[in-house]
Image (cartoon, rainbow, N blue to C red):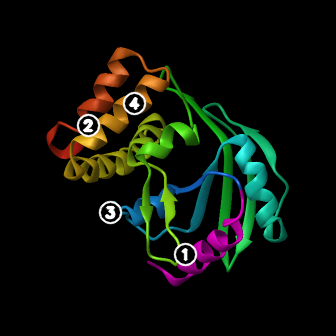
Amino acid sequence: MEDAIRKALASVADRLEGADAVWMVGGSCGLLLQDVQLDRPPRDLDLYADQAGAKLVYEALAADATDKPAYSETPIYASELVHFAIEGMAVELVGGFRVMARDCRYEVSMNRLLPYASSWTGLSRPILLMPLAHELVFNWLRERPDRYERIAETMKRQGDEQTAALSALLDAGSFPPEARAELLGLLESPGGSGR
């Protein structure tokens, strides 16, 4: 792992130690820490929290904020976003994240994700990582096969608990039967293409 990522993660973890919020590392950093092959090293650090938790995370990191929390909505995403510069690393906090794409609706809930989160223990305290099932769903919804195929390959190596995690996330969202079948098929088909 690059030193800049390690320093930024250590700073974030230290400052959030007393915060009463569930937060997790996602995006390319989260994938890297879960042994998913990436084409290039992460350029930023993505933190996820529920909307209420994001306020607490922001308060703890506010000294390094480069903007104020703001609601952001695109044709497929909606969330509260705020950015930081921590130990020379760009950090983005995503609160209350929702994705509406491919006739599906998926909303991030930290309490729902917590049972499936893994943790990285490369620092003095464990760092929670967004479950690979979340990353698979998110990247499938945004039509990024370069990501979701590699995530699926990693999940398949980890076994049945990953299929259970994916099923639970699909049950909690709104996914038509054909979308569910394609996503679950990514964990069964050779090469993870599902196409």
The magenta stretch is 1-19
Residue ID for mark 2: 186
Residue 79, by quadrant, is: top right
Q: Is residue 110 above or below residue 157?
A: above
Residue 195 visible in the picture: no
Q: Earlier in the sequence, mark 3 or mark 2?
A: 3
Q: Amino acid at mark 3?
A: Gln
Q: What number is the disc on residue 37? A: 3
The residue that disc 4 covers is 168
Q: CA distance from mark 3 to mark 1?
A: 17 Å
Q: In the rendered image, which quarter contains the C terminus?
A: top left
What residue is shown at x 44% (from left), y 71% (from top)? Answer: 121
Q: How far, Cα to Cα, is label 2 from label 4?
A: 15 Å
Query: For residue 168, which quarter of the picture?
Result: top left
Q: Nearer the viewer, mark 1 or mark 4?
A: 4
- Asked if disc 3 and disc 2 are in contact, CB closer than 8 Å, the reply is no
